Image: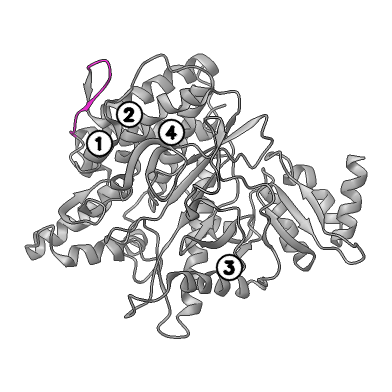
């Protein structure tokens, strides 16, 4: 295992109506989903979500939270027919989650692919905004993680891991990594504190909203390590690590590093290859302090008494990974791993020398550079409301309004995936995971699919008295190589199901 593993990103988008701050966000989010689904010919009654295998209250520490004590936001296995929820032909899920439209990317097997299908989500949201703008006042969507007034919404990462890996090892090695990782992958934010009450600029949009080290919750008492044990795969073999601490990235390099470095650290944890104790003292408080220091000079105190900057701590993880890869693979790295290691070293080197040198690769640095330009030009200070407005405008999904997109068009950022690849990912699923089967079934048999989920497709076939459920518990089956020919020769879902039954019999 290197950086390659089954992974994905899910992002809740900020939403507003021009001139109407009191507009109902759940209603608006439903309009966003319906606007895109209807444009693709997807009816709300079809291609909805299959909740049968969801278990959001199962905890990786070996117990299950009672439904009576769980917060309502944790009950994600309860279908709400009033909320829009569809599956798309690229294998993704588009739905309303916690009063926000959410795009959950299909499963992919590399950080670079994760970047492509995550950016596809931006185009999907942009198309919804364009369609809704035809009936003023329309809606605005933002790929960010806070409204600057005390509300936070998530960008979550998912990584498939081996079940046999002790969860205590994951906690011990990932907490210090996540405390420091934000200097590479934070998106930047005007304001300090959950409600931005204190003037200033910080590295991460999410860090101030985290309150505990380990826990099951995602919208309250947010933990650095989330313990939800919902693998969406063969439970005896796999664990899905649900990471809720990341920011929504626009920069390709930052997004690649967020996924790629985490996957490498997980691979080392699975291989018992981290032989250093990098435990950080008071990790939650340290997480906040790191985010509040754009100089990247804040010292982290380790349990052994060492004091390191976040960049120095990330160098420790980088060097451990480099050593492990050399010992494990004798320097013969796949292209994805080599790419992540190359960018990891380059970005750390720039951040260590002068963070402003990483403005082409790292979101928060790019944003700070723009903010500083306004401050210098207009004599502003960090309490000025205009800077907060610029912060929100940065993440606007519209190409002519979003500051990031305008700067991107001007060539201000390193790009790893092309516009053509992203556009293709809007409609086409990855070819090397079960997302291929899910997406292609939605494309070929849209009127014969009742529902789908990460690990199932449910068919409603004429002539059958009951729904036909096809389980997909192995994420690396259902690929183009294994089911492509079968799909090509199956003109309808009935034929497909007969062929599948014959093959499994």
The residue identified by callout 1 is 285
The structure residue drawn at horizontal position 74% and vertical position 54%, both measured from the top left corner, is: 457
Residue at mark 2 to residue at mark 4: CA–CA distance? 10 Å
The residue identified by callout 2 is 314
Of callouts 2 and 3, the N-terminal one: 3
Q: Position of residue 37 (x, y in %)?
A: 61, 70
Residue at mark 2 to residue at mark 1: CA–CA distance? 18 Å
Q: Position of residue 258 (x, y in %)?
A: 42, 40
Q: Would you place residue 78 above or below residue 236 in this image? A: below
Of callouts 3 and 1, the N-terminal one: 3
- Residues packed near mark 3 inside 10 Å, few (<14), some (14 to 19) or many (20 plus): many
The residue identified by callout 4 is 261
Residue at mark 3 to residue at mark 1: CA–CA distance? 38 Å
Of callouts 4 and 1, the N-terminal one: 4
Q: Which residues are magenta?
A: 297-305
The residue identified by callout 3 is 84
Report the mark closest to the observer, 2 or 3: 3
Report the mark closest to the observer, 3 or 4: 3
Q: Would you place residue 384 above or below residue 184 in this image? A: below
User: What secondary structure is marked by label 4?
Assistant: helix
Residue 418 shows in the view: no
Of callouts 3 and 4, the N-terminal one: 3
């Amino acid at each position: 295992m290197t950086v390659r593993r089954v992974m994905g990103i899910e992002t809740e988008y900020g939403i507003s109506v021009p001139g109407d701050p009191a507009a109902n966000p759940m209603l608006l989010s439903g309009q966003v989903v319906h606007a895109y689904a209807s444009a693709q010919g997807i009816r709300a009654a079809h291609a909805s979500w299959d909740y049968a295998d969801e278990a959001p209250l199962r905890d990786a520490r070996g117990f299950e939270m009672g439904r009576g004590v769980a917060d309502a936001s944790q009950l994600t296995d309860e279908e709400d027919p009033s909320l829009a929820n569809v599956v798309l032909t690229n294998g993704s899920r588009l739905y309303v989650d916690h009063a926000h439209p959410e795009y959950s990317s299909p499963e992919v097997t590399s950080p670079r692919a994760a970047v492509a299908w995550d950016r596809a989500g931006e185009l999907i949201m942009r198309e919804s905004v364009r369609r809704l703008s035809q009936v003023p006042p329309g809606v605005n969507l933002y790929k960010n993680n806070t409204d600057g007034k005390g509300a936070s919404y998530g960008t979550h990462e998912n990584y498939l891991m081996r079940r046999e890996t002790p969860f205590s090892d994951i906690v011990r090695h990932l907490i210090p990594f996540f405390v420091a990782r934000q200097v590479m992958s934070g998106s930047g934010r005007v304001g300090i504190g959950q409600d931005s009450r204190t003037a200033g600029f910080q590295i991460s949009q999410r860090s101030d909203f985290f309150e505990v080290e380990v826990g099951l919750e995602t919208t309250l008492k947010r933990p650095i390590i989330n313990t939800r044990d919902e693998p969406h795969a063969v439970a005896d073999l796999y664990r899905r690590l649900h990471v809720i601490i990341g920011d929504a990235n626009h920069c390709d390099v930052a997004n690649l590093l967020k996924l790629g470095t985490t996957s490498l650290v997980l691979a080392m944890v699975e291989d018992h290859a981290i032989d250093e104790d990098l435990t950080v003292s008071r990790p939650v408080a340290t997480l906040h302090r790191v985010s509040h220091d754009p100089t990247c000079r804040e010292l982290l105190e380790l349990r052994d008494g060492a004091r390191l900057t976040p960049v120095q701590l990330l160098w420790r993880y980088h060097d451990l990974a480099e050593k492990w890869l050399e010992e494990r693979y004798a320097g013969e790295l796949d292209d994805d791993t080599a790419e992540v290691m190359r960018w990891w070293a380059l970005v750390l080197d720039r951040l260590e020398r002068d963070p402003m040198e990483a403005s082409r690769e790292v979101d928060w640095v790019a944003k700070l550079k723009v903010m500083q330009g306004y401050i210098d030009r207009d004599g502003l200070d960090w309490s000025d409301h205009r800077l907060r407005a610029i912060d929100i405008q940065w993440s606007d999904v519209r190409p002519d309004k979003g500051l990031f997109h305008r700067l991107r068009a001007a060539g201000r950022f390193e790009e790893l995936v092309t516009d053509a690849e992203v556009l293709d990912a809007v409609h086409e699923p990855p070819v090397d995971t079960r997302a291929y089967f899910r997406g292609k079934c939605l494309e070929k048999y849209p009127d014969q699919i009742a529902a789908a989920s990460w690990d199932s497709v449910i068919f409603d076939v004429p002539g059958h008295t009951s729904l036909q459920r096809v389980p997909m518990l192995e994420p690396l089956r259902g690929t183009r190589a294994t089911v492509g020919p079968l799909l090509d020769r199956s003109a309808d879902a009935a034929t497909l199901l007969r062929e599948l039954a014959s093959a499994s019999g």
